Amino acid sequence: MIRKMIAANVTLAMLFIVVVPGMTIDTSKSLDGAQDAFIKISKEATPAVVNISTTRVVKNEEAQESLREFFGDDFLRKFFEAPRGDYKQTSLGSGVIVDSRGYILTNNHVIEGATSIVVRLNDAREFKGKVIGVDTKTDLAVIKIEAKNLTVVRFGDSDKIEVGQWAIAIGSPFGFTQTVTVGIISAKGRSRIGLVDYEDFMQTDAAINPGNSGGALLNINGELVGINTAIFSRTGGYEGIGFAIPSNMAKIVMDDLIRYGKITRGWLGVYIQQIDEKLARQLGVKTSEGVLVVEVSPGSPAEKAGVKRRDVITSYDGKKVTDPAELRNMVATSKVGQNVKLNIIRNGKEMEITAHIELLQEGKAAQKSSPPAQFNKLGLKVQPLTQDLADKLGYKGLKGVLVSDIEAGSLSDEVGLKPGDLIMEVNQQEVTNTNDFDKAIADIKKGDRLLLLIRREGFSYYVVIEIN
C-alpha cells in the first residue's frame, strides 16, 4: 500500500564515463564489489522485512459514498446494486522487525482502521499483529508479534546519508514478498509534499510500488536508513520518485510508542516563515538564510528565552536552519526539558540565546468568516475586530483589523489575502483599528512596498505588497 500517489514528470538519467586517452579503467572489480554487497544485504536483511496483511470492515454508507463520488447518483442507481450490509476489505503492506521482542515498524496508513493484522515472515510463519501505538503526524506505527528467533535490522544514522549514496529497498510490492530493488538517494529533506504534518523525506529512485509502504530502505552497509512511505506517480506504479521517512525520525517515534504508547514532542512557541528576497529587503535583513519569527506565543519557551517578532533564527542547537519545516522537525524531536542554543539575527546583529524546551500541547485552529465596507487602494475591505468576531474566528486577545472582502485581480488578491484574515501590522507598526489602518496606507504611492503582518487559521506570517 502506498500512502499517496501524485502526478509527476519522469526524467531519464544516463551515466557517462569520460575516458582520457591512454587511461585504462577496470570497472569489473568495483562492480563485483557492489554486487557482492547487494547479495550480502539481501541475505541478511530480507528476513527482517515482513509482509503485513490487514482487514478492515467497510460500512455500507461508506461504500455508497465512495461510489457516489466517482459516478454520481443517477449512474449509481442505474448500473450498480447497493452493497448489502457491511463488507470486509483487505490490503497489503510491509514492515521492518526492529527488536527481537517482536516489535515491527511500519506506516500508520498500512494498519489504519484494521480489525485484524496478519504478519507473514520470510520463513512463511504467520502471526497476529497487535498495535502498540500510531503517530498520524509522521505516518508511523509500531505493531508487535509474539514470536521467537527473529532477525532484526540494524539502525543506521540517516543524518549521515549523502545524495548519491546507494539505496536498497526491500518490501512486498503488489504482494510479492521480500522484493529487493536498488537505486540511489536522490535528495534529502523533502517537505511540503502534503502527506503528513512532519515531513523530512529522503527521495530515492529505488523502485517502490504499492505494497512497499512500511518496508526498509537500507544503505550499502545493510543498515536501516528509512521507512518507505510514498511515491509520485501518474500511473499508480513506479516512476522513479519514492519517499522514505528518515530512520532517525522513525526511531524517535518508535521509542516513544514502545515506551509510552504515544508521542511526546518538544515545543518552542514561535510562528515562523521562509525569508524570500522581498521580505529580506523590506526588513533590512542581509541574508535569506534562516527563518523569520512572525509571532511568539505568550508564556512559551521562546518568550522566556527572549525571542522577539522579526528575529531571524539561523541555527538550532548547533544545526543550521534553512527552512520552517526543518526547524519544526528539530524542535519536535527535541527532548522535553532540553536546553537548546538559538543563533538569531536581530536588527542586523547576531545573538545567541538559550531556550528550555517544553512539552507540545496540541492547540485549536481558527475558523473563517466574512462581512462588508469599501474597497481601498489595496483592493480590500476591512472592518473592526469586535469581541464577538474575535471569539468566533479564534483571534481572542489579538489586535488588528479584519479583512471582510477582496477585490478580484487587486494587489491584495495577487499576494493571496483572503476574507477573514487579520491584519495586525503595517510596515512594522501595530494596527488596532480601521483608523490606524487607513492612516498607514493613506500616503502610499507607486513604487512603495507595504509589509503586512497577517494572522490566519492560528498562524501568523508576513506578506509584502508592491504598489505598481
Image: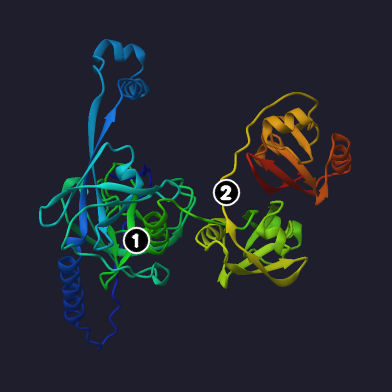
- Colouring used for the render: rainbow
Residue at the image point whose x is 16% and y is 74% from the top:
36
Q: Is residue 379 visible?
A: no
Left or right position of 465 against 126: right
Separation of disc 2 and disc 1 at Cα? 28 Å
Residue at the image point whose x is 63% and y is 32% from the top:
367
Which of 120/338 is in front? 338
Q: Say which residue label 2 marks.
A: 361
Where residue 99 sits: x, y (%)? 27, 62
Where residue 154 sits: x, y (%)? 28, 68
Left or right position of 135 against 272: left
Secondary structure under the numbered disc 2 in the rendered image = loop
Residue at the image point whose x is 19% and y is 64% from the top:
151
Residue 63: quarter of image: top left
Q: Amino acid at mark 2?
A: Gln
Give the quadrant of the C terminus. Answer: top right
Residue pushed farthest left? Answer: 124
Which of 98/179 is in front? 98
Q: Say which residue label 1 marks.
A: 226
Where residue 443 sits: x, y (%)? 89, 43
Q: Is residue 422 above or below residue 314?
A: above
Q: Nearer the viewer, mark 2 or mark 1?
A: 2
Where residue 110 sits: x, y (%)? 30, 44
Q: Residues within 10 Å of mark 1 (few under 14, many from 20)?
A: many
Secondary structure under the numbered disc 1 in the rendered image = strand
Q: Residues within 10 Å of mark 2 (few under 14, many from 20)?
A: few
Which of 132/120 is in front? 132
